[in-house]
Amino acid sequence: MNTIADKLKKVQDEVAKACARAGRREKSVKVVVVTKTAAIPAIQEVIRQGFVDLGENRVQHLKQVAEDIQTFLADNQDDPNIPDKVHWHMIGHLQRNKVKQTLQLCKMVQSVDTLRLAEELNTQSHKLGIHTDILLQINCSGEPQKYGAPVGAAIHLAEQFTTMGNLRLVGLMTMAPLTMDKNRVRSSFARAREIFEEIHKERIAGAKFKHLSMGMSQDFQIAIEEGATMLRIGSAIFS
Ligand SMILES: *Cc1c(COP(=O)(O)O)cnc(C)c1O
């Protein structure tokens, strides 16, 4: 039988192999475990195995799960394998009327793809007296996906985001096209990497701009080879 621990180990081994192929250090790639389909005991096991960066794509579900997990952490503080906190990442489309709630739950919002959403995140962060880490989500697939800023708008949006005093633009996020064609997946990741490097080179964002969030269960090895620093992995662990 494949336990959660076995599956995490398998993912971590694959990450290590892909890093070796790409001549990268394993530590340069962080796994965000996407819990959107997972039962609470399975998430608890993930935490017990040392994974503390967790991703959700719907605010309502995030709120419930984050509360359950908070209780679990508080109840198990004498267990040396249980950390005192975990970090939640919002990875799905975010409506402006859910921004405030999201900020109260999340360490990072990865799915920022419009000026209006960034403005609302900035306003609400200011009201809460916090600075929020965000990623600019771009659509590198060349197909009319619903979410993600068009590639041509990425640099300008990045410039605008960096003028907002309560936001920190710390990187880019993208999703590969839904296809079995590995060449198309690879070229969309490579495109994200180019934009990432251009923002670096032009010094558009500050020193904290260092995350390239790309790669899911089906394609994370390719993403690592193309420079991902953050993977978002769900089904490889929970199904
Ligand atoms: C669900 C989801 C993932 C994880 O996908 P898997 O194929 O289950 O690994 C990653 N990123 C986003 C934005 C998602 O919605």
Image: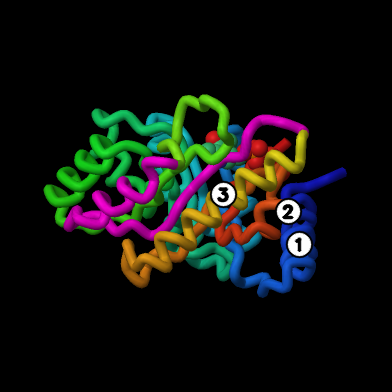
Nearest the eye: 162 or 57: 162
Whichever of labels 3 and 2 marks the residue nearer the N terminus, that label is 3
Picture quadrant of ligand 1: top right
Nearest the eye: 60 or 220: 220
Report crowding for label 2: few under 14, some 14 to 19, many 20 or more residues within 10 A (C-alpha): many
Residue at x 15% of width, y 56% of height: 129
For label 3, the SS is helix
Residue 44: mark: none
For label 2, the SS is helix
Q: Which residue is mark 3?
A: 191
Q: Which residue is mark 1?
A: 18
Write the start and end of the magenta stretch as one range. 152-180
Distance from disc 3 to disc 2, alpha carbons, whole Å, reads 16 Å
The three-letter code of the residue at mark 1 reads Ala
- Looking at the image, do the residues carrying marks 1 and 2 touch, with CB atoms under 8 Å apart? yes
Number of disc labels:
3
- Figure check: 64 above or below 23: above
| Rendered location of residue 60, percent (x, y) | 39, 30
Distance from disc 1 to disc 3, alpha carbons, whole Å, reads 19 Å
Q: Which residue is mark 2?
A: 221
| Rendered location of residue 76, percent (x, y) | 50, 59
Residue at x 31% of width, y 46% of height: 157
Q: Which quadrant does the N terminus fall into?
A: top right
Q: Viewer-nearest of labels 1 and 3?
A: 3
Whichever of labels 1 and 3 marks the residue nearer the N terminus, that label is 1
Q: Which quadrant does the C terminus fall into?
A: top right
Name the colouring of the figure.
rainbow
